[in-house]
């Protein structure tokens, strides 16, 4: 079955994620690299810009169809639109279904397998979860809560994640001449490490009070955020780490 994730509506992606988690249970969590169901609900839910509880509800919807330890919504029949998705996708094998769920948040399994080493392929689930937490899930969390944040009240949001400018969001206000820059980071737990790329560090140093580090924590349980204005001059202590990388190239006379 050739599936194009771009053609699958968002609600159907939520339904399919719930179906996957009901069918493959703990083994499915491990394939995706999550430590528990709550983390999977939070990360994929926010990555899709939707409520994490929606995925849990769909998992509970499909639980009665599979021999797992949960009863789910066994006291009523499966809703018709969910049953339609169930009948269409229930026969996907675990590898194809895992790749499909990963693709919902922009993960290309084929591109990954072509360039990664065997060691990284074997750990691809953990790397997938980590990338989604530090990327789409945290960014979409910020987009959802941004209108309620007093620090950015009256500022219009522009997503700059694909522009390579050293921050994820640019905020502008009709009342302010200069823009604000927000770099978003995500953590699975309540505490952890965040790193700045050389470009992000350079921009933070240049913009000072106009640069904000927005850290979303605790995706494994209940996400919350902390905001650091001018993070290089505040309570955070960044230690510079350098790595020497050997670059190999192949030459030919033509």
Image: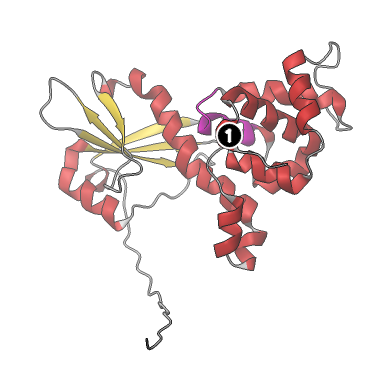
Query: Residue at left 64%, top 32%?
Result: 38
The outermost residue toward the front is 254
Image quadrant assignment for residue 181: top left
Quadrant into which the C terminus falls: bottom left
Task: Out of 243 and 144, give the one closest to the viewer.
Answer: 144
Quadrant into which the N terminus falls: top right
Query: Which scheme is used to colour this image of the protein?
Result: secondary structure
Check if residue 42 falls in the magenta segment: yes
The outermost residue toward the top is 76
- Residue 50 in percent (x, y) is at 53, 24
Check disc 1 and report the residue beneath it.
44
Query: Residue at left 27%, top 43%?
Result: 231
Magenta-drawn stretch, dominant element (helix, strand or loop): helix
Image quadrant assignment for residue 23: top right
Task: Out of 175 and 11, give the one closest to the viewer.
Answer: 11
Q: Which residues are magenta?
A: 38-50
- Residue 215 in percent (x, y) is at 40, 38
The reply to whether residue 187 is visible in this rendering is no
Query: Residue at left 34%, top 19%?
Result: 147
Q: Secondary structure at mark 1?
A: helix
Position of residue 163 relative to residue 84, above or below, is below
Position of residue 61 relative to residue 186, above or below, is above
Query: Residue at left 22%, top 48%?
Result: 203
- Residue 48 in percent (x, y) is at 53, 30
Task: Out of 182 and 49, give the one closest to the viewer.
Answer: 49
Task: Out of 166 and 35, give the one closest to the viewer.
Answer: 166
Crowd band around label 1 with a 10 angstrom C-alpha radius: few (<14), some (14–19), many (20+): many
């Amino acid at each position: 079955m050739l599936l194009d994730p771009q053609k699958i509506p968002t609600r159907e992606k939520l339904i399919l994620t719930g179906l996957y988690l009901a069918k493959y249970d703990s083994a499915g969590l491990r394939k995706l690299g999550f430590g528990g169901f709550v983390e999977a609900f939070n990360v994929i839910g926010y990555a899709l810009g939707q409520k994490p509880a929606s995925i849990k509800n769909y998992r509970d919807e499909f639980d009665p169809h599979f021999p797992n330890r949960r009863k789910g919504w066994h006291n009523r029949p499966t809703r018709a639109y969910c049953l339609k998705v169930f009948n269409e996708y229930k026969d996907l094998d675990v590898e194809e279904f895992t790749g499909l769920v990963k693709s919902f948040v922009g993960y290309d399994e084929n591109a990954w397998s072509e360039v990664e080493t065997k060691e990284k392929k074997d750990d691809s689930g953990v790397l997938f979860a980590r990338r989604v937490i530090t990327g789409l899930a945290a960014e979409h969390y910020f987009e959802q809560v941004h209108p309620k944040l007093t620090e950015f009240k009256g500022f219009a949001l522009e997503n700059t994640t694909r522009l390579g400018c050293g921050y994820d969001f640019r905020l502008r206000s009709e009342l302010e001449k200069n823009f604000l820059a927000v770099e978003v980071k995500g953590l699975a737990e309540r505490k952890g490490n965040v790193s700045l790329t050389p470009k992000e560090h350079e921009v933070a140093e240049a913009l000072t009070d106009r640069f904000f580090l927005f850290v979303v924590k605790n995706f494994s349980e209940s996400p919350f955020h902390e905001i650091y204005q001018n993070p290089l001059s505040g309570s955070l202590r960044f230690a510079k780490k350098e790595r020497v990388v050997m670059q190999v190239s192949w030459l030919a006379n033509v």
